[in-house]
Amino acid sequence: AKKLLDEAGWKMGPSGVREKDGKKLTVDMWTRKGSTPGDYEISELVQGMLKAVGVDCKLTLLEPATFNPRVSVAPEKSEYDMVSMGFNAPTGNVDYVLNMLYSSKAFPPRYYNRAYMANPDVDQLIEKANNTKKRDEQNKLYAQILKRMHEEAPLIQLVDLTQAVAFRDNVRGIYLNGPANNYPAQFAWKEKK
């Protein structure tokens, strides 16, 4: 990271923050606390990693009730440089993630492309995958898209949380569906004693 910043003209300043043309390299990362386990602590970790390479990262802590409305805006209304948040793919399928996070049709407030990724080539590959019926052909397209996402890094997925679900012994019908296990009570009932 240091080498890339040097090559881009961001040289280390006397305060330990990189500078270019007299301007310090400062970013504002919006975060919240308590919405998902470790959300604020992860933001602090990223802040420390950025500091280590000379980027001044300011954390803006938003209340959970105002967080989603403030980050779910059209690109021209966006106020953040970076945002730390969680994402759950309820289908468990890659097509959901690609269509919701990486398609230019998925800009907020409609969907979740909060990085405002807009790449016509990627959009074309996503559409082609959406309209392909054979799974092996889809997988080849998904591999091309994911390779591009790795190279461009509009989002950086840091962790995958493990969730614990507890219930009483008189609750029946709990159905845990992989990534969508946030809502196990949708199929549950309490047995009368």
Image (tube, rainbow, N blue to C red):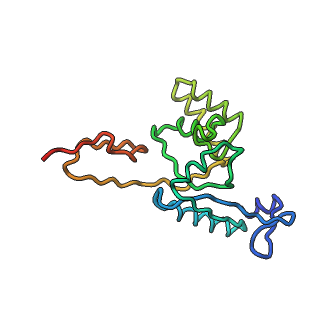
Q: Position of residue 189 (x, y in %)?
A: 24, 42
Q: Residue 9, relative to residue 155: is it above or below?
A: below
Question: In which quadrant of the rendered view does residue 81 lie?
Answer: bottom right
Q: Position of residue 30 (x, y in %)?
A: 61, 58
Q: How many marks?
A: 0
Q: Name the image quarter holding the N terminus.
A: bottom right
The extreme left residue here reads 193
Q: Residue 166, relative to residue 10: is it above or below?
A: above
Residue located at (62% from left, 68% from top): 48
Q: Position of residue 120 (x, y in %)?
A: 71, 34
Q: Nearer the viewer, residue 163 or 136?
A: 163
Q: Position of residue 155 (x, y in %)?
A: 62, 49
Residue located at (71% from left, 38% from top): 119
Q: Residue 105, relative to residue 154: is it above or below?
A: above
Q: Residue 187, relative to residue 26: is it above or below?
A: above
Q: Nearer the viewer, residue 108 or 26?
A: 108
Question: In which quadrant of the rendered view does residue 139 lie?
Answer: top right
Residue located at (29% from left, 54% from top): 166
The extreme bottom residue here reads 14
In the displayed structure image, the side of residue 164 where residue 168 appears, left or right? left
The extreme right residue here reads 21
Residue located at (53% from left, 65% from top): 41
